[in-house]
Amino acid sequence: MATLLAPDFEIPAHLQQYTNLADTRIGAKVLECSDDFFAEASRMLQFDAPIFVEDKFDDHGKWMDGWETRRKRHTGHDWAILKLGVAGKIKAFDIDTTFFTGNYPASASVEACYAPNGDTDNALWLSILDNSVLGPSQHHIFNVKSDEVYTHICLNIFPDGGVARFKVYGEVQIQIQDSRQTIDLLALENGGRVIAYSDAHFGHPRNLINPGRGINMGDGWETKRRRAPGFDWCILALGQSGSIEKIEIDTAHFKGNYPAQVSIQATYIENATDPQLIPQSMFWPFLLEAQDMQMDHIHDYVSEILKHQKISHIRVNMIPDGGISRVRLWGKISG
């Protein structure tokens, strides 16, 4: 049976600085929905782009990679309530109807609430996206003007139909009770993000900040074999600026293709614009000088960390090329 892949889609430039708060990898999940007869609501929160399998059917009909409700035969509309992976200030939605051509919703609206205790029944729900027209098999980017912090979302579709993927772009708001708490300042769930990189032929550097250890060699940053002088690099922004106490570099699953060495440069910059960081990063001071790597191994560094009062960005240098699974920067948030 033939499988169709979703067309390449690049996140708009103004959203690349934000985190998808509805990413299942950081704990987002669908709590309940009005109906998901044809396709489970949880599918629309998957990170991977949707696919279409031409001859795939199940007991309920055509298999679809997304959330799809049955055809509504009475008044009302369908809805799904989801818990964000982390609380945040919402900046935009992407309601993606890819491969839903004759079964997409006519329109959609979004409500949100702040319920850190999980009590959504008694929370104050606010409309943050008015009912907006949707079209077949396309991404719909809706910008949001709100400075409120939210923990839960209700996606309403009118009157029924299917959504392939639903993304909620926003600023992560970490709920820390103790300022002395040590966290991974670079983690995806804490707002870390990729800014630029030299190469990502076999694996994207965004995998470096995913939760947990890599599941296989594809779940990491891997470059093609370098045939020219130099080395590979990527620039990452910490979700929260802070001081670093421990660094972990994990080469899980990389055995014949791990780097010979890895070094990390770092700086603190306020209100940086991403294009400026690439040339500047070459001259950032080292946070960790070049360290020899081992295959399939977690490398921990404490005494080797060079003193920085506070950092906001790092450049990971992979010498000369190869693959890394994860990078962790454990430290405390700086005011």
Image (cartoon, rainbow, N blue to C red):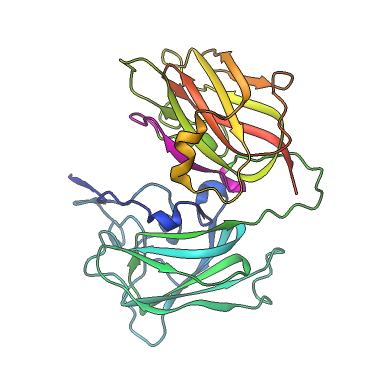
Q: Residue at x 58, y 24 (%)?
A: 249
**x then y, percent, for residue 195:** 47, 42
Instruction: Examine the image and state in which quarter residue 246 appears.
Output: top right
Does residue 195 belong to the magenta stretch?
A: yes
**x then y, percent, for residue 77:** 41, 80
**x then y, percent, for residue 92:** 46, 65
Give the tally of numbered discs.
Answer: 0
Q: Is residue 302 above or below residue 142?
A: above
Q: Residue at x 67, y 68 (%)?
A: 115
* Residue reaching furthest to the bottom: 75
- Quadrant containing the N terminus is top left
**x then y, percent, for residue 62:** 25, 59
As rendered, which of 113 and 190 lies closer to the eye?
Answer: 190
Does residue 130 belong to the magenta stretch?
A: no
The residue range painted magenta reads 188-203
> Is residue 206 in view from this perspective?
no
